[in-house]
Amino acid sequence: MKKLLPLAVLCALAGCSSLGVQPWERDVLARPEMSLDADPLDAAIDDHIYFSKEASSGGRGFGGGGCGCN
Amino acid sequence: MSSNSLQSKLAAATCALLGTAATQPASASDADAWSFDSSVLYYGESDDRVQDISAAVAAKRDFGDERSLSLSLTADTLTGASASGAIALDRVQTFTSPSGKATYSTPARDVPLDDTFHDTRFALTAAWTQPLARLYTVSAGLGFSTEYDYRHLGANLSLARDFNKRNTTLSLGLAYSQDDIDPVGGAPVPLSQMLDVGDGSNKLGSDSKTVLDLLVGFTQVLGRNTVLRVNYSYSDSSGYLNDPYKILSVVDPATGDTIARVPAAGLAGSSGVYLFESRPDARTKQSVYAEVKHAFGKPVLRGAYRFMTDDWGIDSSTLETSLRWPVGASSYIEPQLRYYTQSAADFYRASLVSSQPLPQYASADFRLGEFDATTLGVKFGHRTGGGNEWSVRAEYYQQNGSVPGEQIIGHQRNREQYPDLSAVIVQFGYKFGL
């Protein structure tokens, strides 16, 4: 898994430069629902529920927590 | 060559358009300095287990030049019962409550639930985001939450750098939290026995834990309609990681029934031998999370996968998908599906066998067992003429677990071993600007 980091850096700096769009092609990406953080409150609520009921947490953002969660 | 010159002309035209658009907001919400996202949530488990009513509001103040302040406040009210970890029996079972001041009983053949808890939780977060230099964004946040027996204080810092005409973003985040646990009746000595009412000799005071999180994030625009995010997370917890209210039944090696116990003369107390759980005091988790969003014209499909592994022996996979489908010009409907599966922690035990030596670590907390879970939901949202949005979301959550066959002894085979859980979640949301 730790191999992912250098891979990502390499990709970001070199390989991925061929991917992507020009600034004037961002019409679809600029729609609010295309944002990767479109509904942060829903995401926070889901993270809190699943943190309380399952042994995994985080991934999308920081690990959540901050609760006793019986 | 001609396409390049066309591109530069288009770029100039776009800039010109953006320049005029900036002085004339496209809608009312673009001009709002404050934007709010609020929700009220009901979470209810079947069989009178945990019920939660929660209200949350998140506010964001835009100061221009990509500088913003985000604040959030959440209040939760929890009532109901949760599985204690003890196994079901053919007779009534009596337990000493966590406070050590009373007892509660579970009917024959029922999976024991501890119904003595109710809690109110408040959580507050604040974060500041601003550009640091061209292409760099920094964000710093603080978090605080408090409930009757738990206090959390956290801080986080992240730095992002854009590459490739902002089609690629790399980010690095660090979070640290310091939590204090002050269990009702005191934190029990791990693997000590549940005692009679009034006997607190196995209870210690409060305890604490620290959590350090590291997150490396990568987002990439894959095309005009597609964006990808991949995160690697590392989390290191140390300190008090037990659930102070979880117990294990000590059972007879032949019958599988809990060893009976008689309270001291004149005292009330537990009717069986139950030991408080014992978890390691450190845990390291790693996860990889990948998420894709793709627009098929107006509809938007989201897919996400997370793999997590930790040094307690738990591996989990989570798959999520949702499809946001426009209804008319200003509404949408979004079916959501989530599947989760995890393996058990190495020290998960349905019960402890009286003839065997005590292990160093043991827990019968069903959340550390092997189970899978499915969430099926749908969200409906509507944008008002004023640019605000209300939504309603309904979800059904179902957990199905199993206890390893070799851990099921004697009479246990005829009883429910794993308390399957189902819950209904209903959430109302309202987004507005001021």
Image (cartoon, rainbow, N blue to C red):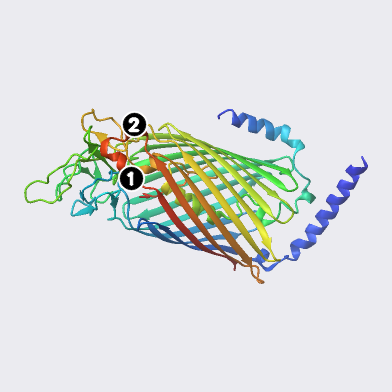
**Nearer the observer, B419 or B245:** B419
The percent position of residue A18, horizontal first and vertical second, equals 77, 36
Give the chain letter at badge 1. Answer: B
Mark nearer the N terminus (2 vs 1): 2
Regarding mark 2 in the picture, which secondary structure is present there?
helix
Q: Which amino acid does label 2 sit on?
A: Glu
Point out which mark residue B406 bears. 2
Q: Pick out the residue farthest to the right.
A: B2
Circles 2 and 1, Cβ within 8 Å, touching? The answer is no
- The C terminus of chain B - image quarter: bottom right
Q: What residue type is labelled 1?
A: Glu
Residue B248 in view: yes
The percent position of residue B394, horizontal first and vertical second, equals 52, 60
A50 horizontally vs B149: left or right:
right
Distance from the alpha carbon under mark 2 to that under mark 1: 15 Å
Give the chain letter at badge 2. Answer: B
Q: Quick check: B247 above or below B61?
A: above
Q: Quick check: A30 above or below B248?
A: below
Q: Quick check: A51 above or below B234?
A: below
Mark 2 nearby-residue class (10 Å; few <14, some 14–19, many ≥20): few
Residue at numbered disc 1: B416
Mark 1 nearby-residue class (10 Å; few <14, some 14–19, many ≥20): some
Regarding mark 1 in the picture, which secondary structure is present there?
loop
A33 horizontally vs B314: left or right:
right
**Nearer the observer, B177 or B195:** B195
The percent position of residue B135, horizontal first and vertical second, equals 68, 44
The percent position of residue B271, horizontal first and vertical second, equals 17, 46
Q: How many labels does the image show?
A: 2
